[in-house]
Amino acid sequence: MSFSTFSKEFNANMFTCVENQFITKYLPQADGDAVRAYLYGLYLCGCAEEFDAESAAKLLRITPKRLADIFSFWEECDLVHVLSRDPLFVEYLPVNAAVGKPKPIRPEKYAEFNRAFYTLLQRANKDFRPYEMQRILEFLEKEPMEQQAFLLVAEYCAKKDGSRLSAAHILNKAEQLCRARKYTYEQVEEDLADFNEHERELSRLFTLLGISRKPQEADYAFLEKWRAKGVAAGAVQAAAAAMGKGTLPALDGLVDELCEKEATGEDSAREYMKRRAEIASTVFKVARKLGVKVQNPRPYAEEYCEKWLERGYDDDSLSLLASLCLKLGYGFEEMDSLIGKLYADGIVDEGGVRAYCASRDRELRLLQKIQNLCGVVKKSQSALDMIAAWRSWNFSEEMILEAAARSANASSPLPYMNKLLSEWKRLGAMSPEQIPAKERVAPEFKSEAAVAADMRADRERHYSELRARAVQRAERAKAQAERDGKFREADAAIRRTEIELAKAELYAPETVSSLRSRMEKIRRERSEALRSIGLTDSDLVPAYSCPKCSDTGYLPDGKMCDCYQIPRN
């Protein structure tokens, strides 16, 4: 024994430390006497004075036998080691110590729980195996969750899963609640009420999105994320309704878009989704008019259509402008530049846009006539602007075409036309009769390079005409053939068989022979269908006058064809 000790006064002011694991794991499962006896014994461990078990039992107002039974209970829990039973002498162990052999679970402790749990299983038409029940009782021994709270978790899982109820699901849900420090009946009831509300919310979203499966645990993470961002449930439903069909990750992207636009309330979200749908519809309308394929309208909406609509252009005006841009070979970017110019000129309302498009259509028709006379003239906005300028000079279409006819041999027809018309404007010649005689017959001076370029242009125009005639003949024959039902059916069968043959060569070589035989049979059927309408297979492909170069003037290796040397009239 040590030579020094605490005085009674010093001991009275000291503290008795209780491990937290005792409070969380064991205290809720023990009765009051057991807890009092454990704490008083723990206190006595720090006292130097002698204090026997009978004195302790008298002080706690319980019998010595009851005190011995209590410490036998704590020994089963591996919290103490009973060194002697008569007289009673106990050694306290750390709460987290793994001392001794595992003690069996006392049946009487869970008798009432087992009856309630088996009644619940009968209602669910389920029967858990002994090892599953053992896992559940081990969970209750280890965790501080109340038995009634665990039964509430099991009842929730039974309603949710029905005949698919499993011990694993019940235990997983109970472990989640314990991690969230939900141990009592009231805490679990409150949490499951929130969970049921989330489940109903997910079910509504699944209905809107066309998802047939039931909500899973991972799906609830999306709800938590949206709530953390302050997005109202009605706003999420508005986004899901706008999607029509889709997945939760896709809906999550749309909700992120709502957050970017600060439309997280239900009303603001519905208004934004309505506006978004209108802009997307405009994008698709413009894209169809432009001949552009659009899969995701959002980039086009943000970069172009939102700006156009904000400037006051409506769908009809944009459709008119898109039709004009198609004739000019424009896309979204070029159309945006055109609208920017119109906006700067104050042309915004439908009447102004319609008048502008009608004027451009007239200029396009005139440009087509100029192309027929001059050959290579590029269809562009600058060409149309030049024609508009000539009209503003009060020149008639007759005079403009007269200038085009005189510019047919020029290397750059439009600049030469501009030169002629500006000269005629200076002379006041507004009709062909007023053009001075010397102006009518004066030849254009051309350098050797310009002459060579004109000759090259003549040859290219000649080849272009040859190719165009050959292609037109083939297209007319193809159009005639496609009016015949037998030909259409055979032609479609050939395309399908070609795809099957390509796949078979990679994945099923043993079927290649039969597919080739079928292909030959279908080709014969197509040829017979062509003969019945007075055509052959060769009529469907362009018949070029020079088979060597296909009326291009150049062989595949890049060398000039023999026909290129033949003088062209």
Image: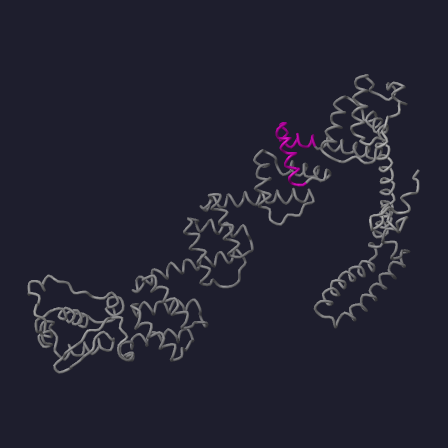
Up-down: is 505 above or below 461? below
Residue 481 lies in magenta, yes or no?
no
Report the side of 137 relative to 84 (left or right): right
Task: Give 355 or 247, whichever is nearer the viewer.
Answer: 247
Where is residue 372? Give x, y as percent. Answer: 84, 35
Residue extending farthest to the top is 427
Residue 337 lies in magenta, yes or no?
yes
Residue 391 in which image quadrant = top right
Where is residue 305? Give x, y as percent. Answer: 60, 40
Report the side of 487 relative to 138 (left or right): right
Q: Quadrant of the N terminus?
A: bottom left
At x 74% / y 62%, what residue is drawn? 499
Residues in magenta, as a range: 331-356
Report the side of 250 relative to 366 (left or right): left
The secondary structure that dominates the magenta segment is: helix
Where is residue 261? Give x, y as percent. Answer: 49, 43
Up-down: is 102 above or below 529? below
Indicate the colouring scheme: one colour
